[in-house]
Amino acid sequence: MFESMSSRPHYSRGKKQIEKGGDESFETSMANSERGQSIPVEQHLQAALRKAENAVKLEEIEGYLFQEILRDGKKFLQMSEEEIADELLVSHPRVNRWLHGKDLPRRRVRKSIVNWVVNQYSTRMGT
């Protein structure tokens, strides 16, 4: 029923050590943000913009991707849930449910919302 402590992953400073059967183990590097190293906001913003632009090109935007893009948009555009709701002409609780994965807009609407996020990024960045 319970797994022994020796079969669970062991975390050490700066590296994630994953044990495989016996004495075998390998390490994977942790992301910079997990180590506490800061990555410039501009770099995060560019990555979020690329992710949103690539999503617009997809035929269908999956729920998890939509949620990530909307969450990144809220963060980098420095908008409250209420402001996003006003811009998209929906209720604040609906945006809250989208952000927390409780509900999703229809597939076609997801694409137009992601397109709106891309346009907001472009406007704010001056591109």
Image (cartoon, grey):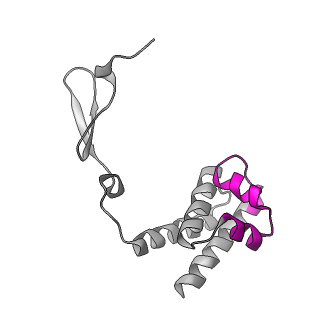
Left-right relation of 90 to 68: right
The residue positioned farthest toward the bottom in the image shown: 126
Residue 75: which quarter of the image?
Answer: bottom right
Left-right relation of 1 to 117: left
Residue 21: which quarter of the image?
Answer: top left
Residue at figure coordinates x 57%, y 73% from the top left: 77
- The residue range painted magenta reads 81-109
Residue 22 lies, in percent from the top left, at 22, 20
Residue 116 lies, in percent from the top left, at 68, 73
Taking the magenta stretch, the answer to whether it contains residue 46 is: no
Task: Classify 104 as above or below 55.
Answer: above
Q: Nearer the viewer, residue 125 or 38?
A: 38
Residue 124 lies, in percent from the top left, at 56, 83
Residue at figure coordinates x 68%, y 57% from the top left: 60
User: Can the viewer see residue 62?
Assistant: no
Q: In which quarter of the image is the C terminus?
A: bottom right
Please name the predominant secondary structure of the magenta segment in the image: helix
Q: Which of 59 and 117 is in front in this view?
A: 117
Residue 42 lies, in percent from the top left, at 42, 75
User: Can the viewer see residue 120?
Assistant: yes
